[in-house]
Amino acid sequence: MPGKILIVIPCYNEEASLPLLLPGLLATTLPQGYQLEALIVNDCSKDNTSAVAKKHKATVIDLPVNLGIGGAVQTGILYARDNGFDMAIQLDGDGQHPPKELPKLINHHLETGANVVIGSRFLEKEGFQSSFARRMGIKYFHWVNLLLTGQQIYDSTSGFRLFDRKAIELASIYYPDEYPEPESLVVFSKAGLKVAEVAVVMAARQGGQSSIRSFGSLYYCFKVSLAMFFSFIRKL
Amino acid sequence: MLRIQIITIIANILFILYISRLIVKGKLREEYAIVWIICTVFLMVFSFWTDGLELLRKVTGVVVAANLVFTGFIFAILIYLLHLSVVASKLYNDNKKLGQEIALLKEEFNKHLESKK
């Protein structure tokens, strides 16, 4: 059963890492019969992200206003829905998610039928593991997720994730705006979608800056906890 | 008429003129102007009717009239701020949808143009 896979790459000022990422991505060997399209969602970058991406044969969507990561990913999801893609895989533009790990996500989806597959760096604890404070934060979200959804998700903040058709349909209607990763899992679980994790090896970012830094991290934890709770009690 | 009455009445008139000007110039939508007009009317009534505040104070059982004014206005302001937050949230959502729609359309349009070449 051949299918089309959309790689959604939300980008904000990633002109430095895209020339490394895109060629590797387009050269990735996928399971038999699968085709890949790379989609750059340019979230109002101030640099040449858009031009660089076009040069490397990626489809580019230029957002007219800055929407943040959630809005950018959702734009990619909408594109996937409207253009009949069977799967969408979100991947960070900063090179943290090596394209050679893509088949792991796809194979895991094909084997288990999970609607959402998260590439997790903590299942086998290989590769870049992030800082101590950040790992603590991620552990905390693991517990919140367990409490709210009853599912063990060890890397709920991972932005390396696969959506199947059902997940695409849902995420195109509702996807959180700011720091969407942990919250969206609550939404998916509530809708009865199956969320699974698969071990991947991640790299440290190759350029750009994380949106979560220093003082912001406290705000991040609080905001995301609040959002997760309200997603939990909200009717879908 | 007391000096303070004259001052508040003049201030009220200037305020209502400014609101009207904003509406006329299209900088303030009528639905948001309503609350400001009501505020001015309220202030105007109490500028003329000086015993009114004393009466309200007795009715509500507040000891100092000034406290009644502050409490009332702070509460009204809080409610209005909350309303504005709701409006801003709705605007954000609408804006997001518009942005996404435009970006997707632009992409489709460019693809179409290129296929025609």
Image (cartoon, coloured by chain):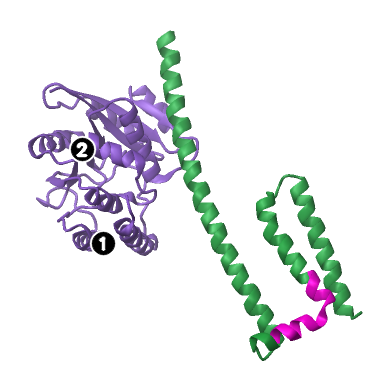
Chain colours: A purple, B green
In the image, residue B91 lies at what x, y percent? 53, 47
- Quarter in which the C terminus of chain B is drawn: top left
Name the amino acid type tagged 2. Pro
The reply to whether dot 1 and dot 2 touch (C-beta < 8 Å) is: no
Where does label 1 land, which residue? A137
Marks 1 and 2 sit apart, C-alpha to C-alpha, by 23 Å
Q: Mark 1 or mark 2, which has the lower sequence index?
A: 2
In the displayed structure image, the side of residue A93 where residue A189 appears, left or right? left
Q: Which mark is residue A98?
A: 2
Residues in magenta, as a range: B44-57
Q: Residue at horizontal 66%, vertical 54%?
A: B32
Q: Residue B45: within the magenta? A: yes
Q: Which chain does the numbered disc 2 sit on?
A: A
Front residue of A155/A202: it is: A155
Chain to which the residue tagged by mark 1 belongs: A
Residue A109 seen in render? yes
The residue at 79%/75% (across/down) is B46
Quadrant in the picture for the N terminus of chain B: bottom right
